[in-house]
Image: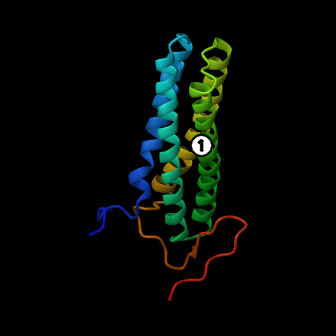
Amino acid sequence: MSLIPNWAPNLHPLLVHFPISLLLVATVVDCVGAYRPSRASVRDTATWLYCGGALMAMAAYFSGLEAAQAMRVGPAESAAVTAHFTWADRTTWFFVVFASFRMAMSYIWHSTTRWVVIASVLIALGGIAMLAAAAERGGGLVFHHGLGVARIPSDGALWTIPGRTPAEPEP
């Protein structure tokens, strides 16, 4: 019995919306915390949301990487997958590092000074812009190129990470 429903081409579409929602909510909570920086509970809530978002971003990243490497795509789709991969890569690792910083901010430094909180919110907003760029390109893969919802031509090549040689097909 597979955990992936029949309608889902792979695990990626089931996971991808969790980091988006968690990271957006974390940033909203962080903005509330910037308004009231003396409230450690708000800061810590945002920190845990960033950590959950970063973990789910890693799950979505690796499931998307696995899904993309199993697809045959034409040149236009390959360029679009590469653009989405590039933004997803940047965004995922940005939020992993940022969540680590937030853990230190919440539990090592216990920082609630206004300038640190505001700087953290501004950095998070930069990450949200990266997330939006990755999501926009992922949406383009689905709604413009039909990846995951339409049959891909069988004469396409397997997508590979830029700069790496393609894997040998399995017998």
Residue 99 % position (x, y) = 58, 36
Residue 28 can be seen in this image: no
Which residue type does callout 1 highlight?
Val
> Is residue 154 positioned above or below 25 on the image?
below
Q: Few, some or many C-alpha atoms within 10 Å of disc 1 (few <14, some 14-19, many ≥20)?
A: some
In front: 136, or 105? 105
Is residue 90 found left or right of 131 in the rendered image?
right
Is residue 105 found left or right of 9 in the rendered image?
right
Viewport quadrant of the N terminus: bottom left
Is residue 105 found left or right of 53 in the rendered image?
right
Picture residue at 47% right of the left edge, 46% below the top: 56
Residue 122 can be seen in this image: yes
In front: 127, or 141? 127
Picture residue at 51% right of the left edge, 47% below the top: 57
Picture residue at 64% right of the left edge, 18% below the top: 118
| Residue located farthest toward the bottom when viewing the structure as drawn | 171
How many callouts does the rendering have? 1
| Residue located farthest toward the left when viewing the structure as drawn | 1
> Is residue 85 positioned above or below 164 on the image?
above
| Residue located farthest toward the front when viewing the structure as drawn | 108
State the scheme by which the image is colored: rainbow
Residue 67 % position (x, y) = 49, 65
Q: Name the residue under label 1.
A: 96
Secondary structure type for disc 1: helix
